[in-house]
Amino acid sequence: MVNYFYSIILSLLDHYLPIIKITKNSTDKPWVTPSFRRLIRSRQRAFLSGDVRRYNCLRNRTQRMASTLRTKYFTANVEQLHSCDPYQWWTKTQRMLNLKQANSLTNLQFQGTPDKLAAEINEFFVSVSNHLPKVDPSILVDLHNDYCSDFTIESTQRRLQIALPV
């Protein structure tokens, strides 16, 4: 009876929910659908057979369908971003744009003294700001008294330890 039950269930599943094989490539965009793939295959067959008129028609349909699918996909994903917190928003945006997570410290492989490292960092910032105009030294006189001496820390001062009441 159990075997009979399973055979009926499996035959009904095969009839109403058949197994469909779908091939996805790792390079496929997330908005690509099976109908879009079929359209591309038809277009390619027309091209290879030399049917220029049919190829042009299918090429135009493929371009219109790609534009529509892409727009629908990104519109749906952008709508989801409106209800996200900033962290989720940035994570989903990176995923949507297919940005790779880069380690910001990968280029920091400096072997040497801290003074040389500081000089390298300084050179980098100088190179980034090369296009900016130089500071006019005459305005520095005006800015000289524009700070509070409470915020000046001398290099000879030691770190203060503050004891907080418990």
Image: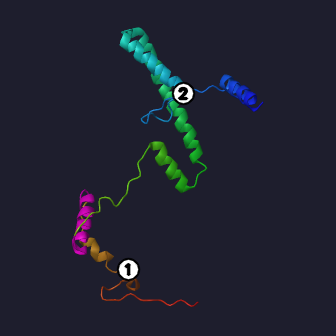
Q: CA distance from mark 1 to mark 2?
A: 72 Å
Dot 2 falls on a residue whose secondary structure is loop
Q: Amino acid at mark 1?
A: Tyr
State which quadrant residue 115 falls in: bottom left
Instruction: Give the side of residue 38 with respect to residue 7, left or right.
Output: left
Q: Amino acid at mark 2?
A: Lys
Quarter of the image with the C terminus is: bottom right
Q: Residue at x 23, y 68 (%)?
A: 111
Instruction: Reply yes or no: does residue 120 show up in magenta.
Output: yes
Q: Earlier in the sequence, mark 1 or mark 2?
A: 2
Q: Is residue 99 above or below residue 116?
A: above
Number of the label disc, if any, that sits on residue 21: 2
The reply to whether residue 135 is in sight is no
Place of residue 80 in the rendered image (x, y in percent of width and height, measured from the top left): 59, 45
Instruction: Reply yes or no: does residue 35 show up in magenta.
Output: no
The reply to whether residue 91 is in sight is yes
Place of residue 14 in the rendered image (x, y in percent of width and height, measured from the top left): 66, 25
Quarter of the image with the N terminus is: top right
In the image, which residues are magenta? 112-131
For the residue carrying disc 2, how many other residues have a C-alpha within 10 Å: few (<14), some (14-19), or many (20+)? few
Place of residue 100 in the rendered image (x, y in percent of width and height, measured from the top left): 41, 48
Report the residue marked by disc 1: 147
Q: Is residue 11 above or below residue 81?
A: above
In depth, the one of 19 and 29 nearer the eye is 19
Closer mark to the observer between disc 1 and disc 2: 2
In depth, the one of 43 and 122 nearer the eye is 43
Rendered image coloring scheme: rainbow
Q: Residue at x 48, y 32 (%)?
A: 24
